[in-house]
Amino acid sequence: MKKLLLGPFCGKPACQSITIAPKPRGVCADAFIQKKTLVVPQVDIYPGHIACDSETKSEMVVPLTLKNENNIEQVLGVLDLDCLAISGFNADDKAGVEKVARLIVSACDW
């Protein structure tokens, strides 16, 4: 996979794709590549942040992961949440959204 494509979302018009390779850019690409949740308290200082909405101040991106038949974890996509407040996400939010991500993956026929 070389690009993440925008799926269902609610918000202002946003970029339709995010490059993962060869030069990844942004929180979504970083979470996808690192296979881990990224919580960014202040997006304006995140290196390579893609500002789809100038009002966004913080962001959380959770990878949607599934283990394949060889028990290797694959990232299928990401769940991206933006907040209009600086430090808008805490540890409880992270834990809850990671549970939602697991539910999404388990409920779909990939």
Image (cartoon, rainbow, N blue to C red):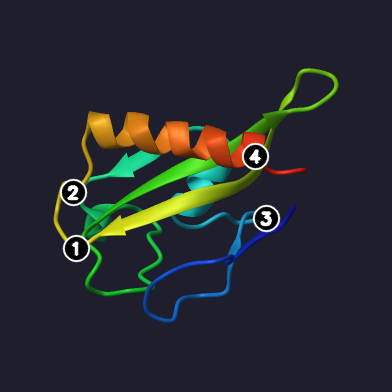
Check if mark 3's residue and mark 4's residue have beta carbons within 8 Å: no
Q: Earlier in the sequence, mark 3 or mark 4?
A: 3
| Residue 34 higher or lower than 8, as above or below | above
Image depth: mark 3 or mark 2 in front: 2
Residue at image x 42%, y 46%?
61
Per the rendering, the mark at residue 22 is 3
Please tell me whether mark 1 or mark 3 is closer to you in this view: 1
Q: CA distance from mark 4 to mark 1?
A: 30 Å
Q: CA distance from mark 2 to mark 1?
A: 7 Å
* Residue 84 image label: 1
105 or 52: nearer the viewer: 105
Q: Is residue 33 visible?
A: no
**Helix or strand or loop: what does disc 3 sit on?**
loop
Label 1 residue SS: loop
In the image, 74 versus 48, the foreground residue is: 74
Earlier along the polypeptide chain: callout 2 or callout 4? Answer: 2
User: Are the two marked residues, 2 and 1, in contact with CB atoms closer than 8 angstroms?
Assistant: yes
| Label 4 CA crowd tier, 10 Å (few <14, some 14–19, many 20+) | few
Q: Secondary structure at mark 4?
A: helix
Q: Amino acid at mark 1?
A: Leu
- Per the image, the residue denoted by label 2 is 88
Above or below: residue 87 compared with residue 11: above
Residue occupied by mark 4: 107
Location of residue 101 in the rendering, given as x and y in whole percent from the top left corner? 51, 39
Contact check, label 2 and label 4, Cβ < 8 Å: no
How far apart are the alpha carbons under marks 2 and 4? Answer: 28 Å
Residue at 77 percent of width and 18 percent of height: 71
Label 2 Cα neighbours within 10 Å, binned few <14 / some 14-19 / many ≥20: some
Q: Is residue 6 left or right of residue 31?
A: right
Which one is earlier in the sequence, the residue at label 4 or at label 1? 1
Count of residue discs = 4
